[in-house]
Amino acid sequence: MKILPLLPLAHLAAVSSAQGLHDLAVKQGKLFFGTATDTNLFKDEAYMAVLNRTGEFGLVVPENSQKWDATEKTQNQFTFKNPDAVAALAKANNQMMRCHALTWHSQLPSFVSQGTFTPETLTPVIEAHISNTVSHFAGACYSWDVVNEALADDGTLRPSVFSKTLQRDFIPVSFRAAAAADPGAKLYYNDFSLEFNSKKTDAAVKIVSDLKAAGVRIDGMGFQGHFEVGKTPSAAALAKVFSRFTDLGLEVALTELDVRHKSLPAGDAAVQQQARDYAGAVKACVDTAKCVGVVVWEFTDKYSWIPQTFKGQGDACLFDKDMKPKPAYDAVKAVLGGGAAANATATRRVRRRRGD
């Protein structure tokens, strides 16, 4: 067998380090390529070895530990130990942090979800929670998902204690409270299935327009990007949806990106389609000047939320359960200008020379 030229290991390491997803995204004019994480995973050394690659992930998001049931389980008693640990990791690694999420219908403490409220009694509960939580992290959060998933798929308000009591008014109440608590944080509305330019997208546009008309600050629209292999919008279609919000003066971001296989194990064709789907979503951000970055909702299949939520589905992440990058990772790297194919070839050359 012909021995191909050996790329010096030191050079290979430098190339790999220089071409992590975050570093490449920054070269494309983005602020970050990041991942969700949380403190329950911090004891997994293999996981942390990837998470701590700051060239790979320049931003982290606490997946669950900043949600209402985790921070204020009992009214007016706040606990921030776990999200503080995420913030400390981000600070130590010089990573940014997106903060998530303040007003959401799910993962609520019982005093909220089972409470009996009037508009006059629920409003100060929302304001107190947001004021205490956001002020605690003031200066640490690039952005906050202030209101999360307020819309049903048909564009109406999702039923919740907030909408049933306050109708649409809980949205400006939440944004005003967040703006007062940390004037330096970007304030986002965050939701799923906005990417398909549907009635839900129209309703999100109206949320933005109504807030702006009322003089309430909103800075960004978060597109969660929870997709299914083969059903992901094209880069052009997604960029067109982004433009509906950037035209209103907002920045946008892909905030929870994953692309799940509907059935497992996935065949080669499905694996390659997943790679194309990931690449298309990231390309939409690359092609949109006011798309500030991409966050994946966990980088490894080992800790993805998908299998617990969608029975029989999964393998939705860029890395497999053994923390090895998948074809989707290479596709994303290529879209970001990383020359993934060349790097993979160089790695194979080193292994062949060694006889691995």
Image (cartoon, rainbow, N blue to C red):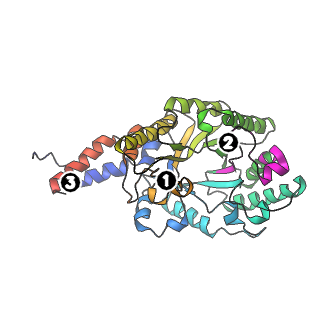
Task: Tell me residue 271's x, y (percent).
Answer: 38, 44
Where does label 1 land, which residue? 312
Task: Tell me residue 239's x, y (percent).
Answer: 55, 32
Q: As drawn, is 29 to the left or to the right of 275? A: right
Q: Quadrant of the C terminus?
A: bottom left
Q: Which corner quadrant of the image does residue 241 belong to?
A: top right
Task: Tell me residue 4's x, y (percent).
Answer: 14, 45
Where does label 3 land, which residue? 351
Magenta segment: does it hold 75?
no
Magenta segment: does it hold 155?
yes
Q: Nearer the viewer, residue 265 or 74?
A: 265
Q: As drawn, is 145 to the left or to the right of 38? A: right
Q: In terms of sequence position, does the residue under pointer 2 or pointer 3 come before the other?
A: 2
Image point (68%, 60%), residue name = 107
Q: Secondary structure at mark 2?
A: loop
Identity of the amino acid at label 1?
Answer: Gly
Q: Separation of disc 1 and disc 2 at Cα?
A: 37 Å
- Is the residue 343 above or below the residue 280 in the image? below
